[in-house]
Image: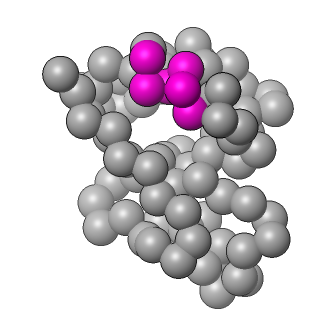
Amino acid sequence: MNKINFYTYPDIPTRKFYTLLNATSSHIKEILNTVDVDCDFAIVNNNESNEWLNNIKKHNTMLFDCNKTTINQIKHNVKTDSR
C-alpha cells in the first residue's frame, strides 16, 4: 500500500513534495484512490500567509493547478518523477 501525505498551512513537508493549487476534496479523494507511489502534497490556498506560500513555492518539486491539470496527468508526473 502506498503512503500519501497531505500538508496544509502552517506545515511544511520535510522531504520532496508536490504542490496542489485549487484542490477540492474530490481531487484529494481521487489522488488517494489513483496515485500508487509514496509521495507528499502541499495543498495551497491563496489566503495563506505570504511567507508560507513563498516557502512552499520555493521548495516544491512540481506545482499542479487542479483547475488546469487532470488527476491522470498528476498521477503520471508523480509516478515518472519518483523513478
Task: Please name the residue shown 31% across and 19% down the image.
Answer: 36
Seen at 73% across and 60% down, the residue is 45
Q: Is residue 1 visible?
A: yes
Measuring from the top left, give residue 66's x and y in whole percent. Answer: 73, 33
Q: Is residue 4 magenta?
A: no
Q: Is residue 57 above or below residue 23?
A: below
Among the 4 quarters of the image, the one containing residue 44: bottom right
Q: From this viewpoint, which residue is outermost toward the left? A: 1
How far from the left and from the top, in percent, is residue 80? 37, 22
State the extent of the magenta-drawn residues as a range.
28-33
Residue 60 in sight from this viewpoint: no
Q: Is residue 66 above or below residue 74?
A: below
- Left or right, residue 1 beside residue 47: left
Q: Nearer the viewer, residue 64 or 26?
A: 26
Q: Nearer the viewer, residue 13 or 73?
A: 13
Image coords of residue 49 (percent x, y): 71, 82
Residue nearest the observer in this picture, 3 or 25? 25
Q: Is residue 6 left or right of residue 48?
A: left
Instruction: Note whether 46 is above or below 3 in the view shown.
Output: below
Q: Is residue 30 magenta?
A: yes
Q: Quadrant of residue 51?
A: bottom right
Image point (71%, 26%), residue name: 69
Q: Which image quadrant: the C terminus?
A: top left
Task: Classify residue 11 as left or right of residue 57.
Answer: left
